[in-house]
Image (cartoon, rainbow, N blue to C red):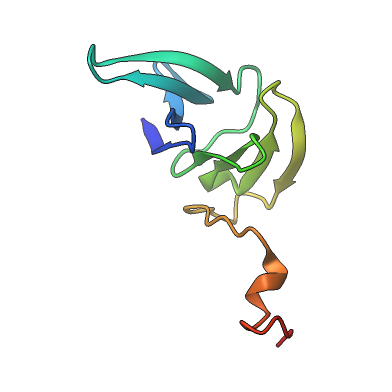
Amino acid sequence: LQHYPNYTPDGTLIVSTHLFGDSKQQRAFEYAVDDSSETLVELWSYGEGVDAFAEQQGEAVRLANGNTLINYGTQGHMREVTLAGEVAWDAALGENYMLGHTSLVEDLYAINRGADGVRR
């Protein structure tokens, strides 16, 4: 069961998925896509030994800084991880909160400023 497959700015495919045969294991995978041979080559993964899991929802999105934002939907949990698998930050809201699709906002303060740069 794949959650939100999407392409990174580098053209690789990134996806959050449950592992076949193990209903409580979730991983994020990044693949190079070879269209001519219709194959995927695994480049990166995260999640082995990690206890976070979403029964539903969830996603993995590559950020501009090269890290990956992982959303564990029904668990109300998200974290940012580096390519080395280190956790940059982690936030757990609890199972009473379902996280849907992640909308990335580059600058929260810019949302509150007009075109003239004045804070509203």
Q: Classify residue 107 by image quadrant.
A: bottom right
Q: Is residue 33 left or right of residue 96?
A: left
Q: Classify residue 111 by image quadrant.
A: bottom right
Q: Is residue 81 left or right of residue 97?
A: right
| Picture residue at 60% right of the left edge, 55% below the top | 96
Q: Classify residue 2 by image quadrant.
A: top left
Q: Out of 2 and 114, give the one closest to the viewer.
A: 114
Q: Out of 51 and 44, give the one closest to the viewer.
A: 44
Single out the residue that lies furthest toward the front.
116
Q: Quadrant of the C terminus?
A: bottom right
Picture coordinates of residue 30 (x, y %)?
48, 24
Q: Is residue 24 left or right of residue 88?
A: left
| Picture residue at 70% right of the left edge, 29% below the top | 82
- Is 82 drawn above or below residue 100 in the view shown? above
Q: Is residue 79 left or right of residue 34?
A: right
Picture coordinates of residue 70 (x, y %)?
59, 39
| Picture residue at 70% right of the left edge, 80% below the top | 117
Count of numbered marks: 0
Picture coordinates of residue 35 (x, y %)?
26, 20
Q: Quadrant of the N terminus?
A: top left
| Picture residue at 68% right of the left edge, 53% below the top | 93
Picture coordinates of residue 46 (x, y %)?
60, 23
